[in-house]
Amino acid sequence: MPKLYNTLPYSMQTIYKQLQTQLESFQTSCEFHGVSFESIAETYKAVFEDHPEYFWLSGSSAGTTITRGTSISVEFRPEYRETSSTNQLRREKTEFESKVAELIALAKRRSSNIYDQILFLHDYLVVHTDYRDNSRHCFDAYGCLIQGRAVCSGYAAAFHVLMNKLGVECGRVRGSSSSALTGEVSHVWNYIKLSDGYYFIDVTWDDPVVSNGSSRDNLSHEYFCLNWNEIKLTHRFLSDQFIPNALGCRFNYYNYFGLYVERYSFDAVKAIAQKQLTRDCKFSIKFGSQTQLNIAMRDLLDNQRVFSISGVSGRISYSVSGSGLILEVFCK
């Protein structure tokens, strides 16, 4: 069962299951007997967090307490994102479930390795979704997976759905993020659990938007499997939520694919760059600290030693990631 379900006492687990049954049949009100509205509302929050596939729910709720003599009941009303007919919701739910099943099957055909499957699904969301805040389902998983338009909550919900179906422990984290382009803004991202522990993944920030508002063509993996020390460089966490103790490095994208150097070495950078330049006109390298990246820039760019690397010639440009750990060099 989902993680938050397991944290509830037995009495609330019973409410949880009843809510699930009624929510999946699109009931707009549910009646409970002998239990307080506060208990139902708390349980509903757990259901909402565990089931991002319930894209029609806003997460808010209301209720009315009804007293009949010594009997007390609560009419609980979950809030829907919009007023859609039951038939329309059923059609959208069927379409959504079919898309999820298709993507999971495709990921498993691509590879039997769970890491590769997770990476494939991450990349799919980035490539097939535009960051848009003016579409009907932009805040939920349906908008991301079906309409291809979403904001951070939609990206994170869609990734959560896919990880649940893949059998990977996953959750959503709320807080804020900051960049030179946006300043500090409210934000939602994910965590997952792999064989050596927890990692953070921010699908939205791996789908970068440039200053003119258009999507950049290249796919980023800067925020694929970060540990706590790395994510805190650009993200802030709200305190009233589960925050995993993410300390791993092994499954960070740059570590996993051999694109990482702890301390700057020209020979190490040259070998990593040449491996990438055989198939592309750019290379990127992650360093162990911002200090090491600055050392690399002075040697490679200020001293123009980058031109000693086979495949680098003519005019070049470069960029530094928001975390200050990744240098990307573009060869024109």
Image: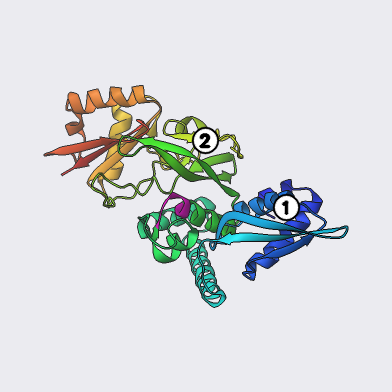
Quadrant containing the C terminus is top left
State which region is magenta: 150-155
Query: Mark 1: which amino acid?
Result: Phe
Q: On residue 37, which mark appears?
A: 1
Query: Mark 2: which amino acid?
Result: Phe
| Residue name at image x 33 percent, y 47 percent | 208
Q: Work out whether mark 1 precedes mark 2 in sequence or the reverse, and give the earlier one.
A: 1
Question: Residue pushed farthest front?
Answer: 69
| Residue name at image x 59 percent, y 56 percent | 164
Q: Is residue 202 above or below residue 18?
A: above
Quadrant containing the N terminus is bottom right
| Residue name at image x 52 percent, y 35 percent | 237
Q: Which residue is mark 2?
A: 237
Which is in the foreground here, disc 1 or disc 2? 1
Circles 1, 2 touching at the beta carbon (< 8 Å): no
How many numbered dots are placed on residues in this image? 2
x and y percentages locating residue 96 in the rendered image: 51, 68
Question: Residue pushed farthest bottom?
Answer: 87
x and y percentages locating residue 17 in the rendered image: 73, 61
Q: Secondary structure at mark 2?
A: strand
> Is residue 264 visible to us here?
no
